[in-house]
Amino acid sequence: MIASVRGVVAAMSPDGAVIEVGGVGLAVHCAPGTLAGLRVGAAARLATSLVVREDSLTLYGFADDDEKQLFELLQTASGVGPRLAQAVLAVHPPDVVRKAIANADTGILTRVPGIGKKGAERLVLELRDRIGPVPVGLDGAAGATTGGWSEQVQQALVGLGWTAAQADQAVAAVAESLDGPVPPVPVLLKQAIRLLGRTR
């Protein structure tokens, strides 16, 4: 089991990074929030979870051990694989996920692409007793889905090589295009990258 990696960020893409460890480049799948904290050429440490399949070995990376532990716990629920577990953490911080499960707040869970009402109810049923301590007084919904998306997308774009001014311009354009509920951060990041691709 590869529990963590520490090394220099050799490259970044919209869905992951390559961390060079001892001369070996490890491809690590990361959510936008994690990517936002990385910079090409800078040293980084990621908590990691290795997912083993018959035909693949996939390494998932996280900003801290708390995210990693929740990622692994989510996969113990029936019907939840690594991609869906990472999608949950891309949309909500760990504390918001824990509170939603503990309080049976399926509305927050269904904001994750791929989780419907039945899936959210199954997560609550199977994980409620194992979710761990829930912070008191945490406002789950609004801050998680709308409060920090612009900053996360802006930081991720800078990490991918665009200037801060270009990133700000793209975030503003994406914000103007929004109509209705705010999509998950990965969707917003892809929209921003598409916009920037046209201006390059």
Image (spheres, rainbow, N blue to C red):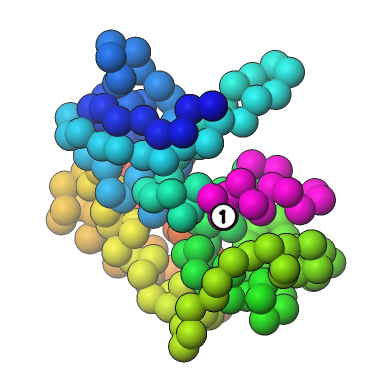
**Image location of residue 152, percent across then percent down:** 34, 59
Quadrant in the picture for the C terminus: top left
Q: Is residue 77 on the magenta stretch?
A: yes
Q: Which residue reaches farthest top? A: 23
**Image location of residue 61, percent across then percent down:** 44, 39
For residue 17, what is the image quadrant? top left
Residue nearest the observer in this picture, 19 or 189: 19
**Image location of residue 77, percent across then percent down:** 76, 53
Is residue 114 visible in the rendered image? The answer is yes
For residue 104, what is the image quadrant? bottom right
Tell me: residue 77, above or below residue 10: below
Residue nearest the observer in this picture, 164 or 152: 152
Q: Which residue is located at x 30 percent, y 20 percent?
A: 21
Q: Name which residue type carries label 1.
A: Leu
Please tell me whether mark 1 sits on a helix, a strand or a loop.
Answer: helix
**Image location of residue 37, percent across then percent down:** 28, 49
Is residue 32 visible in the rendered image? The answer is no
Q: Which residue is located at x 17 percent, y 34 percent?
A: 42
Q: Which residue is located at x 79 percent, y 62 percent?
A: 126
Image position of 138 (left or right of 5)? right
Tell me: residue 72, above or below residue 93: above
For residue 148, what is the image quadrant? bottom left
Question: Label 1 belongs to which residue?
Answer: 70
Residue numbers of the magenta segment? 69-82
Q: Which residue is located at x 17 percent, y 30 percent?
A: 41
Tell me: residue 76, above or below residue 188: above
Q: Is residue 4 on the magenta stretch?
A: no
Residue nearest the observer in this picture, 19 or 47: 47
Quadrant in the picture for the N terminus: top right
